[in-house]
Amino acid sequence: MSVVFGTVVNGPLEENCYIAGNPDNRHTVIIDPGYEPDRIISEVRALSLTVDAVLLTHCHFDHVGAVPQVAGEFDVKVYGPSGEEDLLLAADDMAAFFGMPLEMRPYVDCWFKPLDILDFKAGRFEVRDVHGHSPAGSAFVTGDICFSGDALFAGSVGRTDLPGADHGVLIDCIQRNLLTLARATRVFPGHGPSTSIGEEIDRNPFLTPYRCAVRTVPEFS
């Protein structure tokens, strides 16, 4: 079972970069290295971890800005969601538009799709479709942990006023592919504090109209 070894809150938008993996062999993946690569690298080194890969929930600039430095430091491949190639290419321009230029151009080595299993010594990470905030946004589920990217937050959901976003699609994906997880599943979002599936079913105001339907949705597999 994978655990979260550490969270590096980084960059002007306070994005959460997660270091997660296998506590027995101390292999890990780095999820969404956005900014401040030196801090991310230092955290991994301080914990004496071995990095297997860099995983991206989506390709908005605040989640990919430190990819070249982090992946290069540990000599690992970068995995991102298929369907966000254009978004990745636009990361530099988008960052500049928000006044937060990137030091280096981010890249992806391997593109995954929903239902794929990313299997590493750090653990098995199931890809779930949560697009709507971005064109092909994904969540990673490993054991009783979910990394939800910018789809589901504690008490909120991802913004949908950006190119390629759709609020209705996002809510539908959350309902079908996240709320069907066990209530105790811990959710680690792209920004802000962690939460649980049960807490969001009970309290998230953006999901209120969908609560009654949750138990009728077939389990995602």
Image (tube, rainbow, N blue to C red):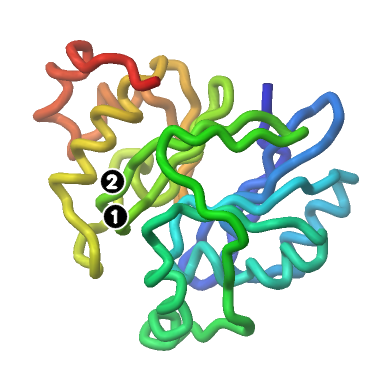
**Which residue sits at x=35%, y=40%?**
129
- How far across and how far down the image is residue 38, in percent? 76, 69
Q: Is residue 163 above or below residue 181?
A: below
- How far across and how far down the image is residue 127, in percent? 47, 37
Q: Is residue 100 above or below residue 27?
A: below
Quarter of the image where the C terminus is located: top left
Element on which disc 2 rests: strand
**Which residue sits at x=64%, y=67%?**
67
Out of 178 and 118, give the one closest to the viewer. Answer: 118
Identified by mark 1, the residue type is: His
Q: In this view, does 78 lie to the left or right of 114?
A: right
**Which residue sits at x=51%, y=59%?**
15
Quarter of the image where the N terminus is located: top right
- How far across and how far down the image is residue 28, in percent? 75, 41
What's the mark number on residue 157?
2
What's the mark number on residue 115?
none
What's the mark number on residue 133?
1
Asked if the residues shown at circle 2 and circle 1 are in contact, with their CB atoms under 8 angstroms apart, the answer is yes
Identified by mark 2, the residue type is: Val
The quadrant holding residue 104 is: bottom right
Quick one: which residue is furthest to the left in this view? Answer: 209
Q: How many numbered marks, from 0 up?
A: 2
